[in-house]
Amino acid sequence: MSQAPFVSLAQIPDFSPHDVEVLGTDAHLPAVPLHALSEASLRQRFARPDLGKATAFHEPLWNDAPPKPASVLLGLVMRAQPSVLLTVRTAHLSSHSGQVALPGGRQDTQDADEIATALREAQEEVGLHPDCVSVLGCLPVYVTGTGYRVTPVVALLHPAMQLTANPQEVADVFEVPLAHLMDPANHRRHAVQWRGVTREWFSMPYDAEHRQRLIWGATAGILRHLYHFLSAGD
């Protein structure tokens, strides 16, 4: 069966994820309980990685080139209320410019494995020292339509970490409460049609300090996978 052509949202003239209609949320699904977001519970959950673990997710690729290996660090900052470390990519980057993202990037030849890639990229992008990181494990691979085979590396981050954004790659660094992201009532569904093809995705808005952060696309998809993983273990 032939596959429908992939719609890259970047191809759509004047596309803005902020302007696309919200089709609904998943408020009917339960949020991950707060007790399941504690350090002890997270460590226990990742000690049973095969329980309810999803398979790799593939967006339709927009060309036939093999996906390039990459990693992101899904860093959980262990404050009184745990949060997720996120960045805003600078506007001049060639891909995903200006978007909210997890620290990460392409695998280099000197990287020992996917975890090494995530740690190196996080240190390069936001100055996160590996001593402040305790890796829990990896979520299933997420293959993006733009041609990256992304391994999400989940880790606990020490709240006293010192961060310095690399201005060549990162415009801003911020945190979003983990409980907010693990509540499907905040998972909005979208779809857009262009040239006869429908493209669907999630977004997760978060309002803080008189501004809205919009998490969407692959980053929202990876966080959605974390939700399913933690929900299966409760």
Image: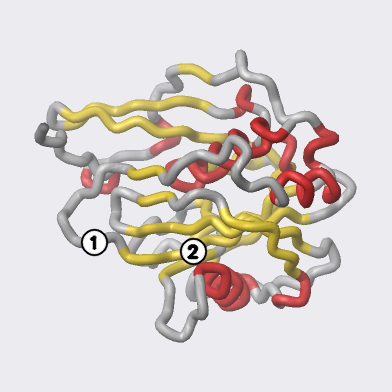
Of 91 and 157, nearer the camera is 157
Alpha carbon of mark 2 to alpha carbon of mark 1: how far?
16 Å
**Counting other residues with Cα less than 10 Å from the Cα at mark 1, is it few (<14), some (14-19), or many (20 or more)?**
few
Name the residue located 76 percent from the left edge and 76 percent from the top edge: 131
Res 85 quadrant in image: bottom right
Where residue 205 sits in the image (x, y, percent)?
58, 35
Considering every residue shown, the one lying at the far right of the view is 80
Read off the residue under disc 1.
Answer: 66
Considering every residue shown, the one lying at the far bottom of the view is 110
Q: Secondary structure at mark 2?
A: strand
Where residue 101 sits in the image (x, y, percent)?
52, 54
Give the amino acid at mark 2: Ser
Name the residue located 32 percent from the left edge and 65 percent from the top edge: 68
From what the image shows, is residue 12 above or below residue 100? above
* Residue 71 numbered mark, or none: 2
Name the residue located 50 percent from the left edge and 47 percent from the top edge: 219
Considering every residue shown, the one lying at the far left of the view is 2
